[in-house]
Image (tube, rainbow, N blue to C red):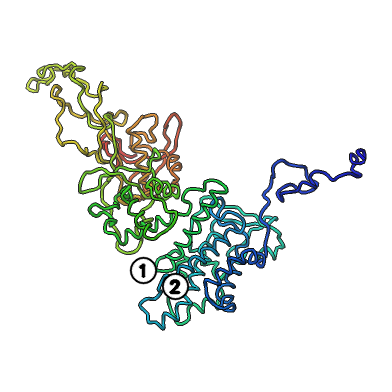
Amino acid sequence: MALLSFLGLGGPPPLTQTARLDPSLPTAGSPPSAYPAVDPGIERRTVEEMIAANQGFIDRIKLCYGCDRPTFERDLLIPIRNYAAFVNLLPATSDNFYCSAGGLFRLGLEVGFFALQGTDGHIVSGRATISTRRHLEPRWRQATFLAGLCSELHRTLSQVVVADEKGEVWPAFMQPLTTWLTNRRAPRFFVRWLADHQESRALGLFALPHIIPREAMQHLATDNTVAVPHLLSCLAGSPLYREQNILVDLVKRAAALVIDRDLIASANRYGRPILGAHIERYLLDAMRRLVATDQRWSPNADRSRVWLSTDGLFLVWPNAAADICKLLEQDELPGIPKAPDTMLEILRSAGVLAVKADDEPLWSISPPPGKAVMDAVKLASPDILLPPHGEATKPIPASIIARKVTDSQAAPRAPAAATVSVPSPAATKPRRDAPASEGAKEPSTPDLFEEHPCPPPPRIVTEHGELLGAESGEAPHPAIPAQPTPALSPKSKPRTVMFTLKPSFCLLPQVRDALVIAIESLNGDAKAAVAVTVAQGVFIPLDFFKRQQLDASVVLRSLSECEMAIADGRSRVTTTQHEVGGKKEIGLVLKPEFVGGLNPADFAPSP
């Protein structure tokens, strides 16, 4: 028998045919593998199978809706079946909430159910008559459930790419996923998640005709003009300017509830979930509401939380975090963080905040009228918080960033009297009444730029060199006469000069922030400096802007429009080659008049 088994003529089948406990294992006949080398994909399910798997929860929805069977099937069950056909077993996220097969369908059902429950505590159209409200209430309840059901529909159009076994991609804008898989006779599908995608909730409106029938939409719009606009506004994430959208509040609270519950369950089963993957939109919504309603959030007002200047938009932190937390507590949203550091990490992970060169999210600012220095966070763009419509906020025409500098970056101070030999005033003061003889030399003066044995503590200065917390007109050391500041040349610069950017008002904020980093690098170690001084100005490599995720053409065009860089006769910024850090780099030359601390007269004119 052993011989027959060896020859393949009898005996038990091979191991690869009996140990197929996982569909991801290799098929029969293929060499055994200790780890699956291919993605097993997700098996296709019919609409009837998906409805049967969630029948218990659908019965709860019918009970909450409170109607007979034909009305429930017409108003809610048909959209539920269409929604199941559109998403099939797609997960809602790749590795966060509702990330298993069928997660997106279950998420839509639960958000719609809890939003529908929330309508019991609201009186819609409160200013209308009783007969009008009686007519509108069933339509409001139907619209609320549909808004919750389709609230995350935009994910299918912006975050995933679905393909079959042959590599054909699902055209999500054209037909439901189940219909496409059935037409292609594909038993399973494969999901690829897009990296660095941007959330656009308005994309869900393109798939809405596949979910809500035309008859249902017409039923919602019968004898009223508010149900359908509120539904579309909720799905698109755009506010209504004349009244509050009740659907947005109900759906937002229901989504926060079910997602928080799933994250807690996922943490119990699979470990710690990703921090704040769904909370950043609630934080941004709270900030926009505070700007519109709270006087303390009026930009550039006295003791405001929001400051807009040429450097960008800043929020005073952690004062702003306390206001956000208080507002979200009033909304009774579960899972909202209370600690300012947690909010800071969530906003930073979402790309809302701009960090400094040392990867520090907190900035030191000194807004007018006082010179008090406070911590703040900087938004990546002012358009995130300030609305593009309406009255525009004028930025402060100056820099409000304050930095802590050491003695090598502050004003020159005299060394201690015990370590410096001071000549007499008669020997140090040159005689002006006597004619200078040919070849005569002036008496030498003490060097004020030698290293101090005991440097003073750091002081705070603004971008324009203003000392904060120090008395103006501070006298030099009494034992040493005051010395004139030596002229700055392109090849040598005193360590006491502080270099800052003096940008033009028409410069793009992204380009301005990158130039600030490049110019400030001149104040530190010369080996780590990004920019270098050349005969015509300050040379900045183009590779530096690429590391700041800026396109070189955008930088050149912006500097050309503001006339901040050396250009040719046709007003186009010219690129040149210079050695930086021991290697040749291609870059541009910034004009010296836009760099604080440089004397334009010491630089050669542009050829």
What amino acid is labelled 2 in the image? Pro
54 vs 564, nearest the viewer: 54
Q: Which residue is mark 2?
A: 229
- Give residue 358's position: percent from left, percent from top: 39, 38
- Give residue 385's position: percent from left, percent from top: 36, 56
333 vs 94, nearest the viewer: 333
Mark 1 falls on what kind of element? loop
* Residue 570 visible, this orientation: no
- Give residue 495's position: percent from left, percent from top: 28, 29
What amino acid is labelled 1 in the image? Tyr
- Give residue 581's position: percent from left, percent from top: 42, 30
Q: Residue at x 48, y 81 (%)?
A: 222
Q: Which residue is mark 1?
A: 241
For this orientation, the residue located farthest to the bottom is 131
Mark 2 falls on what kind of element? helix
Residue 128 is marked as none
Badge 1, how many Cα within 10 Å: few under 14, some, many 20+?
Answer: few
